[in-house]
Image (tube, rainbow, N blue to C red):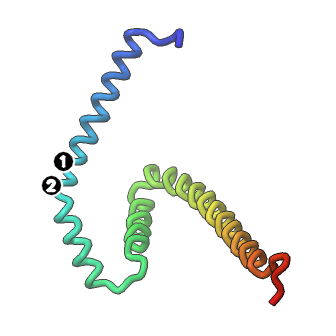
Amino acid sequence: GDAWNEDIEAAWQVLWDNACAKMMESIRLGEEHGSVVEDIWQKLTSKIEAKNIAEDLGSHIVRYLRKAHPDLITPWTEAFAEWDELHRKRRKKEDQEKSSAKKDMALAQDVVEPGKLD
């Protein structure tokens, strides 16, 4: 637009370069440490009988952070709760639509085609 100029272009280039550098570093760290984390996770899940180990672990981390750093975790938990509520509503609507479609399919299969009487 009209507001675009060389300074803005340079700032966007710096932002882009920084984002790419961070992504490349994250990829490098993932490649370097990923197998160790996967091994630890496999050992943990083999020793603990929990259906939702990730959720349980996450819940413990959130509880700890809520006590240790409430200024950090409170906004996150509020945002997550909003997202979770929207996600649940979306899933409920999708489930209702699937159920309705299945009922429609069942009704369509029950209709006798014209000229064919059994």
Quadrant of the rendered structure where residue 65 is? Answer: bottom left
What residue is shown with label 1? 28
Judged left or right of residue 70, residue 84 is: right
Which type of secondary structure does the marked residue at label 1 adopt? helix
The answer to whether residue 84 is above or below residue 71 is below
* Nearest the eye: 100 or 9: 100
The answer to whether residue 115 is above or below residue 25 is below
Picture coordinates of residue 11, whole percent (x, y):
36, 19
Residue that protrudes farthest toward the front in the picture:
115
Alpha carbons under labels 2 and 1: distance apart: 6 Å
Picture coordinates of residue 29, whole percent (x, y):
19, 50
* Nearest the eye: 95 or 5: 95
Q: Which quarter of the rendered picture does the C terminus lie within? A: bottom right
What amino acid type should be assigned to the residue bearing mark 2?
Glu
What amino acid type should be assigned to the residue bearing mark 1?
Arg
Residue at the image position 43 percent from the left and 50 percent from the top: 72
What residue is shown with label 2? 32
Q: Are marks 2 and 1 in contact (CB under 8 Å)?
A: yes
Local crowd size for mark 2, using a 10 Å CA cut-off: few (<14), some (14–19), many (≥20):
few
